[in-house]
Image: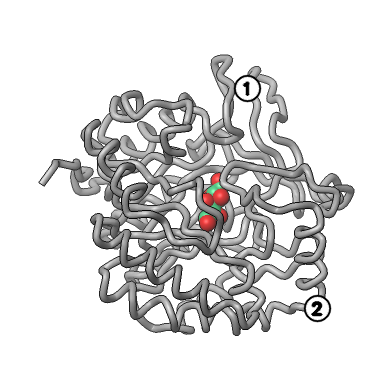
């Protein structure tokens, strides 16, 4: 297992020097953030991320995310050029030693919450999703944003896009995902870069937009779309676990034993209603998910991919990107590496400069 930590590049208020002090951390998960989706990342930008990480004794082998252009998800003729650009990014990342690329196939919006600072009785705050509040949100009004979202839409562009999706079904998305995988997976195999799709967060349709990476049946189906082991998953416990129908421990065991889990996002959620949840601290005792069960499954299946603590609460007066402060994620990292050690996992891999 390679313990990793998300870093939003040189703009991140959390310096690499702090991340490097988290016990047993192997590397950072990052991306080139100043290029619009669908464009090729410059070799210099990729190399610079790697050099900055390496200079702090950290690996840069896992990218989150290379975004998929909406024309690919919509299946428009213009997707060809965006597929070419995607393949070129995979090649360039492979050249710099990247082994795993995370992406998602959610139409227009990435992850979604209704409250980014919901206070808890202990004085911390965290991210919350309440279906009733989401129903009251108007995506066409703009102004919604979360870390990692594509910020490049104009209000007209956003409305046009939502109109284009209005006629799309989950079946259309599956068809377009297959075209994407057929184009990109052969390049991944050559470049030795594993592709790891992130589940939809939350794992159900929002704003009338279809979402397909939601449940076991659909995960099975997307893995079958391309049988290569390079077509794999980012097993995000909190995203899948937000749906009561998903038994996250069993799904981890199942897909990890098939060698299809390349990246794990570990976090906990407390389910508070059918479609209402609050993000909590990582330990099993704090939420509805057994992180112990998840790590047990990973230890049992000999998982050797990347694992990172996912969103943290805001604690100790910290402010910053919602879900991506330092303190609670660092507590999460130590909890996870402690669990790993206690469960008899092989010693966490450490990065050394070749
Ligand atoms: C949220 C993240 C997501 C994730 C993308 C992957 O915190 O887990 O934004 O990075 O969906 O493409």
Residue at 68% from the left image edge and 25% from the top image edge = 120
Query: Among all residues in the image, which is located at the extreme right?
Result: 136
Cβ of mark 2 under 8 A from ligand 1: no
The residue furthest left is 354
Q: Label 2 belongs to which residue? A: 167
Asked if the residue under mark 2 is in contact with the one under mark 1, i.e. CB atoms within 8 Å, the reply is no
For label 1, the SS is loop
Residue 275 relative to residue 228: left or right: right
Query: Is the residue marked by circle 1 packed among few (<14), some (14-19), or many (20+) residues within 10 Å?
Result: some
Residue 70 numbered mark, or none: none
Asked whether 287 or 139 is in front, the reply is: 139
Mark 1 to mark 2 CA distance (whole Å):
42 Å
Residue at the outermost top position: 317
Q: In this view, does 266 lie to the left or right of 23?
A: right
Q: Is residue 50 placed above or below 197 in the rendered structure? A: above
Nearest the viewer among 70 and 105 is: 70
- The correct choice, above or below, for 10 with respect to 227 in the image is above
Residue 293: percent from left, percent from top: 43, 51
Residue at left offset 67%, top offset 82% = 172
Tell me the residue that label 1 is attached to. Answer: 124
């Amino acid at each position: 297992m390679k313990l990793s930590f998300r870093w939003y590049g040189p703009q991140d208020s959390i310096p690499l020097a702090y991340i490097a002090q988290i016990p047993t951390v192997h590397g950072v998960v990052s991306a080139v953030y100043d290029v619009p989706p669908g464009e090729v990342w410059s070799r210099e930008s990729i190399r610079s991320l790697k050099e900055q990480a390496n200079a702090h004794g950290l690996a840069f082998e896992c990218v989150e995310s290379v975004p998929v252009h909406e024309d690919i998800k919509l299946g428009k003729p213009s997707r060809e050029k965006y597929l070419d650009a995607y393949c070129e990014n995979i090649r360039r990342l492979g050249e710099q030693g990247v082994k795993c690329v995370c992406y998602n196939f959610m139409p227009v919006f990435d992850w979604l919450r209704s409250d980014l600072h919901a206070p808890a009785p202990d004085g911390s705050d965290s991210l919350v999703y309440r279906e009733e509040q989401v129903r009251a949100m108007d995506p066409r009004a703009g102004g919604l944003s979360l870390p990692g979202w594509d910020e490049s839409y104009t209000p007209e562009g956003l409305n046009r896009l939502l109109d284009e999706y209005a006629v799309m079904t989950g079946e259309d998305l599956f068809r377009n995902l297959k075209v994407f995988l057929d184009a990109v997976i052969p390049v991944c195999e050559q470049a030795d870069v594993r592709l790891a799709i992130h589940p939809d967060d939350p794992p159900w349709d929002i704003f009338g937009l279809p979402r397909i990476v939601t449940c076991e049946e659909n995960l099975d189906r997307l893995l079958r779309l391309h049988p290569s082991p390079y077509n794999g998953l980012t097993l995000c416990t909190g995203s899948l676990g937000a749906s009561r129908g998903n038994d996250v421990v069993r799904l981890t065991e199942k897909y990890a034993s098939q060698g299809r889990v390349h990246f794990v996002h570990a976090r906990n959620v407390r389910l508070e209603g059918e479609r209402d949840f609050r993000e909590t601290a990582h330990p099993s005792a704090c939420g509805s998910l057994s992180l112990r069960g998840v790590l047990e499954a990973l230890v049992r299946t000999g998982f050797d991919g990347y694992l990172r603590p996912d969103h943290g609460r805001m604690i100790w007066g910290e402010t910053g990107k919602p879900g991506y402060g330092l303190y609670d994620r660092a507590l999460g990292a130590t909890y996870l590496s402690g669990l790993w050690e206690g469960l008899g996992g092989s010693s966490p891999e450490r990065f050394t400069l070749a």
